[in-house]
Structures are given as structure tokens and as C-alpha cells.
């Protein structure tokens, strides 16, 4: 199951066969008429590679309506971390809209790569009521010698819809772009692969609740992922044993 946020008004939920369907959930935290649900079943799936299919389908159905498409999963949340400008002597925090408008003037930019921050289990065994208020421990950023910057060096893409061709590569985070467009980071540095290092999140970040509680992780291992594979125990061991830090930036949001 993948959640892809399209621009700012329309959210499209690509439901990969959930039982009961995600559309039955009464509370999504935003107005219900802002969400369009697509429930895929074993009969409507095109291949095991559902994450790529979800992104491509979302771009095909809604890309012409919007300038940007954020390629995010349901356990990932964008945070505007700072930046902005001073207007009338008052510091205005940068919004997602103003952040993306900064790149729209460049004809070469086809996508923006956003570094993630991986949340640990915070030593929880069972699923909590609130994800953002409960998982308040994150792994520290690693240097380039640790698997090319570590887990936090991995990125999520916000793509110009008129440059989007298709999602490719691990986790669907690498995007084929048209017109020789390039992908850049928040500081206009060119990003060629799925990672961006050194890691910076001075303007924007993706909070990724990648493991959840021990119970949630075991459920994830059993059901597999959106790319037709399975998450291994090694991922839990790696995340849980890396140096960590307190990170409660998202805990102010409900739920």
C-alpha cells in the first residue's frame, strides 16, 4: 500500500488490497472529499511491483492537474524544517509551496530529492495509538563510509509532473525524467542516484517511520513490501543498533 500526495489539494491513496479497504477508515485527518481511493485487488494488480505501479498510475491520472507530485509512502511525512525570508521585519517560515516555487524558475530541474530521517522503534513492542507522538527516537546521520551515508542518505522525490516518465530503482525513489532534466537537493546540488550525501535537512525533511514497534515490524516481514519482496530482520537489527537521538519534531501533530 502506497500513499502518494499529489500537489496540495488532492491526495490519492493507492490501496494495495487492504482488508477492509482503506476507504472504510472514517478519519484521515483531512477533509474526506480531498481524498480519492484506488483499491487494487489480485485481479487488478499488474505485477508484484505495486509501488512503481502506484506512482505511475497517480502521475497518469492526476499529473496534468498539478505541477508537482510527492512520492511518499503512508509511513512517511514531510516537514518544513526552517529557512524562509524576512518580510516586514518578521521571519516567515518557508512553506512547501514556496520551497517548490524556488525551483520552478529553472528549466533544468525535474525533481527535488529530500533526505529522510529514520525513526526507530523507541523500544515499543506493540502498536501505539499515535505514531508521531510515540516514535520519538531517530538514527543519527552517518558519514559516507557507512554504506554511502547510511539510511538517512536515502531520499524521496518530489517530481515535476511534466518531466515525469516513470518510477524506477529501489523503493521507487529513482525517477526517469524527460528533457534531460536533473534532480537536485534542497541546496541546488545535483543528485544522480537514490541517495544524497552529506545529508542535510535545513529546509525540508521526510520523517520515515520505517520499523514501527516490534509487533508492526513482524507484520511487515510477513506481508512483504510494495516491491514484491520482503523486509529482512537485518533492517531491524541495523536501525535499532545504530547511534540514535531524540527527535520529537512531529509529535506536535494529531494523531
Image: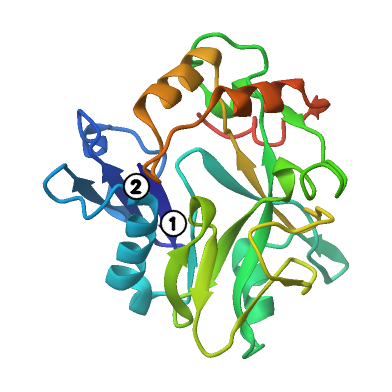
The reply, left or right, for residue 233 in relation to residue 52 is: right
Looking at the rendered structure, the secondary structure element under dot 2 is: loop
Residue 214: x, y in percent?
Answer: 54, 14
Q: Nearer the viewer, residue 24 or 33?
A: 24
The reply, left or right, for residue 167 in relation to residue 200 is: left
* Placement of 249 over or under 98, stated as above or below: above
Q: Nearer the viewer, residue 60 or 95?
A: 60
Disc 2 marks which residue? 31
* Placement of 67 over or under 56, stated as above or below: below
Residue 34: x, y in percent?
Answer: 32, 54
In the image, which is nearer the foreground, mark 2 or mark 1?
Answer: 1
Disc 1 marks which residue? 5
Residue 91: x, y in percent?
Answer: 83, 61
Name which of mark 2 and mark 1 comes first in the sequence: 1
Could you say which quadrant of the image residue 90 lies in?
bottom right
Residue at point 34%, 56% (across, down): 54
Q: Residues within 10 Å of mark 1 (few under 14, many from 20)?
A: many
Q: CA distance from mark 2 to mark 1?
A: 14 Å
Amino acid at each position: 500500500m502506497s500513499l502518494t500526495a499529489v500537489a496540495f489539494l488532492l491526495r490519492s491513496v493507492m490501496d494495495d488490497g487492504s482488508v477492509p479497504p482503506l476507504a472504510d477508515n472514517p478519519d484521515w485527518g483531512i477533509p474526506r472529499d480531498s481524498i480519492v481511493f484506488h483499491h487494487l485487488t489480485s485481479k487488478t494488480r499488474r505485477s508484484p511491483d505495486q509501488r512503481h505501479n502506484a506512482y505511475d498510475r497517480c502521475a497518469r491520472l492526476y499529473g496534468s492537474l498539478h505541477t508537482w507530485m510527492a512520492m511518499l509512502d503512508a509511513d512517511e511525512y514531510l516537514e518544513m524544517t526552517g529557512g524562509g525570508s524576512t518580510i516586514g521585519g518578521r521571519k516567515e517560515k518557508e512553506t512547501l509551496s514556496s520551497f517548490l516555487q524556488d525551483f520552478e524558475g529553472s528549466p533544468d530541474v525535474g525533481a527535488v530529492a529530500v533526505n529522510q530521517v529514520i525513526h526507530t522503534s523507541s523500544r515499543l513492542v506493540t502498536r501505539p495509538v499515535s505514531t508521531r507522538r510515540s516514535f520519538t527516537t531517530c538514527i543519527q546521520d552517518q558519514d559516507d563510509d557507512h554504506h554511502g551515508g547510511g539510511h538517512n542518505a536515502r531520499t524521496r522525490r518530489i517530481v515535476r509532473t511534466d518531466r515525469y516518465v516513470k518510477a524506477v530503482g529501489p523503493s521507487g525513489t529513482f525517477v526517469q525524467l524527460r528533457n534531460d532534466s536533473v534532480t537536485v537537493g534542497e541546496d541546488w546540488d545535483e543528485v544522480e542516484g537514490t541517495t544524497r550525501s552529506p545529508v542535510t535537512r535545513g529546509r525540508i525533511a521526510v520523517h520515515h517511520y520505517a520499523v514501527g514497534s516490534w509487533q508492526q515490524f513482524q507484520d511487515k516481514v510477513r506481508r512483504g513490501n510494495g516491491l514484491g519482496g520482503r523486509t529482512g530482520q537485518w533492517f531491524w537489527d541495523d536501525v535499532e543498533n545504530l547511534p540514535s537521538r531524540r527527535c520529537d519534531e512531529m509529535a506536535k501533530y494529531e494523531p
